[in-house]
Image (spheres, rainbow, N blue to C red):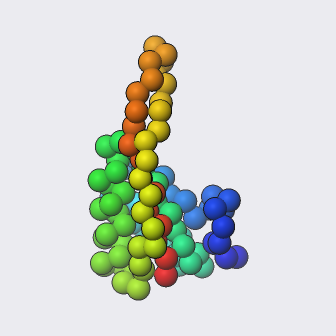
Amino acid sequence: MSAKGEGNEENVIYIGNKPPMSYVLAIVTQFNSGSSEVIVKARGRAISRAVDAAEITRNRFVTDAKIKEIRIGTEAITNEEGRTSNVSSIEISLTK
């Protein structure tokens, strides 16, 4: 089971409001299950948590992991009232 190609959603970890260590566990588990690449995605205020999770994973748990690519962007999100607001997004690709 290789984690190659953009269409593979198994190796994507979405960052939310949990503490960074719970995402670190998810990333390490993904690597241990045979994935050669894990993509960490976050939006808005969760971006700093995504960076923390990627760095903790790289420095403490999977020391041979490298940052392959970092993609940043802006997503337009429509709220309940119908107003559109722009939210920053980040994708960090970690490879072994």
Residue 61 to residue 43: above or below:
below
Q: Residue at point 60% right, 79% down?
A: 34
At horizontal 63% and vertical 58% (from top left) the residue drawn is 9
Quarter of the image where one finds residue 3: bottom right
- Residue 33 is situated, as x and y percent measured from the top left of the image, at 58, 76
Q: Residue furthest top?
A: 81
Instruction: Residue 26: give x, y in percent of width and height.
Output: 47, 64
Count of labels in the image: 0
Left/right of residue 36 with respect to residue 7 in the rendered view: left
Task: Locate the N terminus by quadrant.
Answer: bottom right
Q: Nearer the viewer, residue 12 or 88?
A: 88
Query: Is 76 placed above or below 59 here?
Result: above
Q: Is residue 88 visible?
A: yes
The image position of residue 64, as x and y in percent, is 41, 85
76 and 28: which is toward the camera = 76
Name the residue located 34 percent from the left edge and 51 percent from the top edge.
47
Relative side of 69 to 33, left or right: left
Residue drawn at (36%, 72%), measured in percent from left and top?
57
Image check: 59 left or right of 83?
A: left
For the question of whether residue 17 can be seen, the reply is no
